[in-house]
Image (spheres, coloured by chain):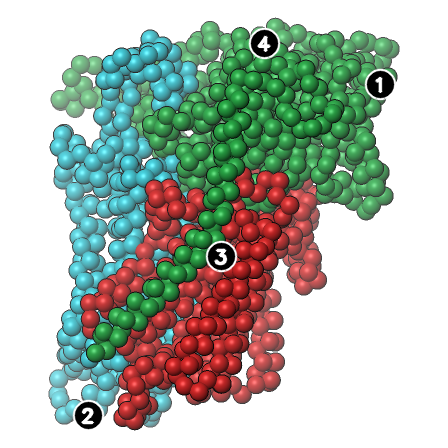
Chain colours: A cyan, B red, C green
Amino acid sequence: MSVGQPVKPETDETLHTSPSIDELVGTGPVVATPLWRVRLRLMRRSLGQNWALFRENKMGMVGLVLIAMFALMAISHPILMATVWDPAIYHPLRGHHAVVQEFTIVEEVTDETTQIELNEARIRLNPFVDVGEVVRIPTQPAPPTLTGEYPHLLGTDNQGRDILSQLLFSTRAAFFLGVVAALTSVVIATTVGSVAAYFGGWIDGGLMRFADLILLMPILPLLIVMSAAMEINMVMLGVIIGILNGFGGVAIVLKSQALSIKVKAFIDAAKVAGGGDWHVIFRHIVPNVLPLTFLYMMFGITEAIAIEATLSFFGLLNVEMSWGLMIHFAQANGYLLSGTTYWWLLFPAGLAVTFMAFAFFLVGRGMDEVVNPRLRAR
Amino acid sequence: MTRFLARRLVQMAVLFVVFLTIVWLLLQAMPGDITNTMVGNPDIPPEVRMDIRERLGLDRPLWQQYLTYLVNFFRGEWGVSFSRYPQPVSNVIWAALPRTLVLFLTATLLAFWMGFKSGKLIAWGRGGTTEQTFIVGGVFLQTVFYPWFAIVMMWLFGFYLGWFPIGRFITAQVWQGSPFNANDMFEELIVTAFVAALVYTIGRQVVRRLATSVVWEGRFRSLLALVSVGGLVLYWYLHPGRTYAADIVHHLMLPVITLGLVTFGATMLLTRSAMLETLEDDYILTARAKGLPDKAIRDRHAARNAMLPVTTSLVLSLAFVIGGGIVTEFVFSWPGMGSLLLEAIRVSDIPLAAAILAMTGVLALFGHLVADILYSVLDPRIRIT
Amino acid sequence: MRATRTRASFVRLFALLAVLAMVAAACTGGGSADTTTADTGTETTEGTTGTTAPPDTGDDTAPSTTAGDGGTGGQLDTFTAGIFADVTTDNLWNNLDQGNSVWNSYVLTPTSDTPYTVAYPGIEVVPQLADGPLEPARQEGDVWIGEFRLREDAVWSDGEPITAEDVAFTYNTAREFNLSVNWADYLDADVVESVEAVDERTVRVTFNSQPGLGVWGLGNSVPLMPIMPEHFWGPVVEEARGTDDPRATLLAASGQGAPAAGPTVFTERQEGSFAAATANESYTRMGEEITSGDVTYTFGPFARNYQYPVYAGQDQAVLALANGEVDFLLNPLGMQQGFREQVEANPDLTAVVNPTNGYRFLAFNHTRAPMSDPAFRDALTLLINKEFVTEQLLQGVAFPLYVLLPEGNTSWYNEEVAAEIGAANGQGMDDDTRRAEAIRILTEAGYSWEQQPGWADGDGNISSEPGEGLSFTPGSGLIGPDGEPIPQLELIHPTASYDPLRATFGSYIAGVAQELGIPVVSVPTDFNKIINDHYTPDSEGNYPLDYDMHILGYSLGNAAFPTFHGEFFGTGAGANNMGYSNPELDELATQFNAVQSVEEAYDILWEMERIIATDKPHVPLFDTGILEFYSNEVQFPFTETLSGLQFLQSSGFLPALVTTR
């Protein structure tokens, strides 16, 4: 949640590692192939070079592997639901399954498997049951079971719902949220940054004052107020985080990057060649700030995941299921500090949030080292 | 510089009004009001809700409420808290603010100091397993799901190991009937710690000017640290309320450690990156070529420049103290501004929520201003005109 | 070379940290040591368990003979009860007005006392500061006069007598200052003409019409109103009169040092940390033995000090309970089920569960078709298998309801009528019978389907009755009696993160309705938004009524005289946001308010229950028990009581009842 932290403007070394199309086209031999193919080839080449650099970064690769695993988890949920898992049992929201045991209510328990003490029966069922009644008590939350007709690899929650199913289901939501937030922020930040840099003057002034205003916004308190004011779902949350990020710190960073590109000769060349303002911005400036943009996308995803989980943890979002909400349920129902007894209610979701944010952050760092050669290992 | 400041201040004022407006609009957009809690109680007739709304001025036209809010805000009249009726909002805030500041300042300063030191060291000694461990640890701390992490910490140290009290600010059993007020005691703690820090900082500058050799400087510095920390400890040891102060400090430790660890991870990574960038700079090469000792290059040349982004980040994180404190305060039952904000929003206590958010805005504004000024002071390449 | 130096630096850095940690530990060492001392102090007093000497304060006014034997328990040094939010006021006027919160009530109500009160666990009205039972009001010309006498030995904690003047002062001040919220309920401004002191101990209340039990007897009214000390508040009130906003001035005044009439005297509050009180040595009822609901117990207080530490969450509070830091946890919603196992496994702790005084319901908008059609409401209600949801999905936290009056209200509950109503509303029915019945009701009322729901055999023939070898096939496209398709109906309920129970019920109801072709969708909605959109009348008191169905919950107020039927369902009643109207119910509600005997009231109440169960403005769905934990260091004369032990605290008794084991 480090919005508002100014990031040191990147130097123009970026350009050395991801050679600009325009530069290459300008200096290369005249070819008869269509322009798009040239662009494609160059893009592939630059991607290849960057990939080679990225691959040297062990931790970045760890991040990628982790992301791939999460992606697998996300994909596996619908498949499992359609094939192996009976929706009545395994649906993350409406599924229910519990081992039910029959007990006779007694004053003094002599046989623990068939009898239950009055006070406990009242607590576990309802305050009106009395001695002599036979009650059926399901075990929920239930610890992980690997065998049986309906195995629950990560146990069930206090409503008898499968934790693994919830975990996989939420992975998709987390990805979705991260991508929405990151795309929104990147589109806004690139546009704002490039436009401000290109036009300068009052447009620049206005946009940057607006960015200042956004930077002023305390994201978490603001989102807490917003979630009270309106019902925020995943898409809205993604867009809101994206806007706050995109208009704020990232836009400012990308603007300084765009500024360094604006003064390059090929921009003037493009203008002389008759390129309109928007053509120059979107064809020449934006592609050159893109590598940096991807970097911020990764950090944006990390942040969006953390924010969503935190808001869900407070029970403020109107979402069906998410990792944060799983922890919220565990907390709201009092299972949180029972130590390791109910670990399956607390650890899978907590670790999932952590590792997903961890993975994207690692990839972000890896990319940072690609675009910023000084950070690379010597 | 003066012109810059003047312009910046005007900008800040305008920004602040816009910010206040946005905050107010958002709070108004919250469905319902404080009287929501009275629904569903047959002992409270519905007319009472109307009566209360009238009493709180919630039945007036919105623009009127808005103008009153803006004007009163700048006159320092933040109104009466709805949920703690009829306490003035300012009283509620002044009671909570020091608690948030201390928790956050202690955690942040400690974490930055340690993070900076560790970051410096791992950047300098690149490539070892130590570096890898620290980086992975740092990234983990930075990306860990904080509420979860805090809960695990509380369970582990508060309950399982029992080293620290479980949440809260003071132990009621210790304080009942005490002649001291917890808030006053708290403020005294802040003041004395500040004085000790001031003595150390000033002393250090003096020592640096006067010391004849690096060795003596180091010795003096150690002595200075001993004197300031020792003085602080001695002061509180002789204080009649030392049990109470110790109780507060004991409660403060776990939240500080938890919050500090997370900040530590981020700072360490930031310092490392900043150091790596400066280490490539020409003047470091020059310094090496001159045959200066490694330690001098590291501390005098590289680290000083790496401090720039770290300091900025520190100042800015201080600006976001209230927002940053919400989770910590919630998990550790710490009665600060963050808990207050959560509660105010939950019960639609609009004056209280508005004032807290406005405080957040003020802090953020000044944080940005200070960061800008620091930038110009620390970085010779930037000159504010 | 560089690596070793780096390592050396690390060592130094961490050595420094270790020193810091040691310094910190040394500082806190004192703190923990003192905590231990405090604990030992408690243990020392426990050593004297069994001796029930009155608290020794060195105060000469303390009666030395009244402390009775609590039966089994003994003297306690400090009773520590955790609360979950700050005590925000020390002013009782304010706590009964806008400054009210349950947390304030936990701490402040035990400092106040009333002429009459509702005794628990029996839920009957008994004299408290008054002498003898309440006599019926008598007619004198145009007005009715009610009188009661205060006990001769009733004194404030500062030794001053509690007089009839204090009662009149309290009533007249509240009325003059236009105090609201809870006061509105005590003032009964529409029937009470005046409250005055006849002599030092006799209070006279004049009514403009014959008072029913609600204003003279059982309901919240002058006899049940807390008394404020005139000798303390008189000058404050006088001063407030002269200010611009007398009401705000009175409510903002500090109540620090106000003499108490209840079992405790408020002493201090450290905001964000705790509130505290001490025993009232001159508590009027000290040593008094009463029998209520088959339980006989003696009033204390049996503790010297009362302490209310504030916890932000139940987790921290339960850990503190397990650590022995607190004796009991006060929470109006009870504690979460998740702690149950941990508490039961702990030999030092006890868990108890009690029914609450409230219910969660499904409400129909009676002004919109098809909800305005009784057949539709009946069919939809029948489909809801409350036993399935509460026993299977919400196991252990909820139980099904069929009548509104809670079973836990032992003095008003009618098991027979409740069972009859339950049977008429599908209690214990299996799912197929429910479906068949619902299909029958809808068909008879003229509804039809695009795709008829029913039971199919292997050849695809659909029967409207379940049978051997037939399987249920869902229907779709319900068509109203007028031939128009039923539009999509929205069922609004709180979100899962706000209340998983109501959210589960909401999506379950939508599910079973859809199976039958009734197009109901569940719409999880922010709680505050539900209140704002559907529970906020305009300036004329009319509700917008722009919903189809919703799920919410109500609490039921004074259990000794449940007036809620009229308040919730009367035509145009303040809380009637269903557009429901039934003249028969209105008539009964009026009768109930004017009723002179409890027996009569009882019959009327259950007649109203029958009407509600038939008309279904609200369909009661479920309620939750209130789960509470306490330390075995303390004990209470009884633990089975409506709304749990916490309710005894907010009605002021618990501090007088708690003893050591």
Cβ–Cβ under 8 Å for marks 3 and 1: no
Which residue is drawn at the image coordinates 53% and 8% (left, top)? C294
Circle 3 residue: B103
Element carrying mark 1: loop
Q: Residue type at mark 4: give it.
A: Thr
Chain of the residue where label 4 is placed in the rendered structure: C
| Circle 2 residue | A27
Circles 3 and 1 on the same subunit: no
- Specify whether disc 4 shares its chain with disc 1: yes
Question: Mark 4 sits on what residue?
Answer: C291
Look at the picture and state if C228 lies above or below B292: above
Residue at 49% across, 29% down? C43
Q: What amino acid type should be assigned to the residue bearing mark 2?
A: Thr
Residue B265 appears in view? yes
Residue identified by numbered label 1: C200
Q: Residue B114 vs residue C132: left or right?
A: left
Marks 4 and 3: in contact by CB < 8 Å? no
Q: Secondary structure at mark 4?
A: strand
The amino acid type found where label 1 is placed reads Glu
Residue B232: image location, x then y, percent: 53, 62
Q: CA distance from mark 3 to mark 4?
A: 52 Å
**Residues indicated by labels 1 and 2 sit on the same polypeptide chain:** no
| Residue toward you, C460 or C505 | C505
